[in-house]
Image (cartoon, rainbow, N blue to C red):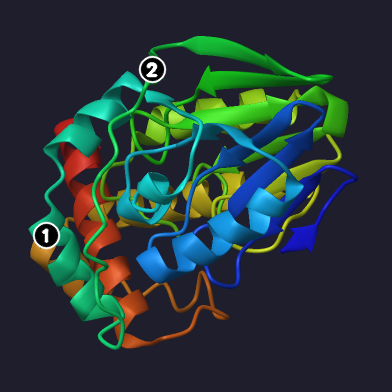
């Protein structure tokens, strides 16, 4: 784990998303959990050295953030929409996904989707030891994104509303996403923990604004030129816009998925 502040640690080596922990005088708060069961168990053992896990917070409903929950103690806190997604998740589907992504690792027999103990719809504040955890519903990457702000550590955990890898737009709410990023800029923080990628400062937020706007403007231009959805899918590669983006099979698939989603949203909204 990488130590960010005196009490904040971020794991991004064995976890697909950034799985973080905040150590307080009265226990540990976990923010998102590793997806692969073996890695989730490993991470749980490591953070257990800091003290008892009191809360686990899921910042969104996607499997890379929620699947390791069952291996951690404490009360599980999510958005109400994330709870619905967890309750609808099937272990068999998870096995198929894990076989596709990490075929050398099997799903442990003790794996299960853990239902939340506490949910929020808008805002919630948790107090533990000398620390304050402001949970704020800030839609963008999905309608159910939760941002966690810990003022004592001058740190914000943005989930995938800020990501330093290729963003996923397949459940996005673009207008809300841009609004959320403007709200995040107003917070007085030194550290921004994104959903994926290296921890940074508030410049990460501006970078994400540029990324979201670039995607939106590219699809808007395609629509203005009269491209059909299929033409946009087959034409737009984002090579010019993001020349440093690896062109592997996974990213090529994500680009096509993103083009499809944004095209459908923008044409439904009238362009």
Rendering quarter of residue 150: top right
Image quarter hosting the N terminus = bottom right
Q: Report the residue at 50% width, 45% height from top.
A: 32
The residues tagged by marks 2 and 1 sit, at their Cα atoms, a distance apart of 24 Å
Q: Residue 93 carries which label?
A: 1
Tell how many labels. 2
Local SS, label 1: helix
Going from the N terminus, do you reach mark 2 or mark 1 first? 1
Residue to which mark 2 is pinned: 119
Task: Point out residue 35 in the picture as x, y percentages from the top left corner.
Answer: 39, 60
Image point (39%, 12%), residue name: 121
Image quarter where the C terminus lies is top left
Task: Name which residue lies at 31% across and 81% down.
Answer: 105
Residue 244 vs 130, above or below: the answer is below
Viewer-side residue, 92 vs 166: 92
Is 184 positioned to the left or the right of 229 in the image? right
């Amino acid at each position: 784990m990488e130590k960010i502040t005196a009490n904040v640690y971020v794991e991004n080596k064995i976890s697909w998303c950034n799985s973080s922990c905040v150590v307080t005088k009265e226990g540990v708060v976990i923010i998102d959990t590793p997806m692969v069961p073996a890695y989730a168990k490993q991470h749980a053992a490591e953070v257990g050295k800091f003290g008892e896990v009191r809360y686990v917070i899921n910042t969104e409903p996607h499997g890379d953030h929620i699947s390791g929950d069952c291996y951690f103690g404490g009360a599980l806190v999510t958005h109400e929409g994330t709870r619905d997604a967890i309750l609808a998740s099937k272990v068999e589907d998870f096995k198929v996904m894990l076989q596709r992504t990490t075929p050398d690792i099997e799903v442990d027999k003790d794996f299960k989707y853990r239902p939340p103990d506490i949910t929020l719809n808008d805002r919630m504040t948790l107090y533990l030891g000398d620390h304050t955890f402001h949970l704020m519903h800030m839609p963008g990457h999905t309608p159910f994104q939760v941002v966690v702000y810990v003022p004592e550590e001058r740190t914000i955990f943005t989930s995938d509303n800020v990501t330093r890898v290729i963003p996923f737009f397949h459940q996005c709410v673009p207008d809300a996403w841009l609004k959320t990023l403007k709200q995040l800029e107003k917070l007085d923080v030194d550290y921004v923990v994104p959903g994926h990628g290296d921890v940074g400062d508030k410049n990460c937020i501006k970078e994400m604004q540029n990324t979201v706007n670039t995607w939106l403007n590219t699809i808007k231009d395609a629509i203005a030129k009269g491209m059909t959805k299929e033409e946009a899918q087959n034409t737009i590669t984002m090579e010019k816009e993001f020349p440093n983006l690896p062109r592997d099979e996974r990213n090529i698939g994500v680009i096509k998925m993103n083009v499809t989603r944004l095209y459908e949203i923008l044409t439904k909204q009238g362009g």
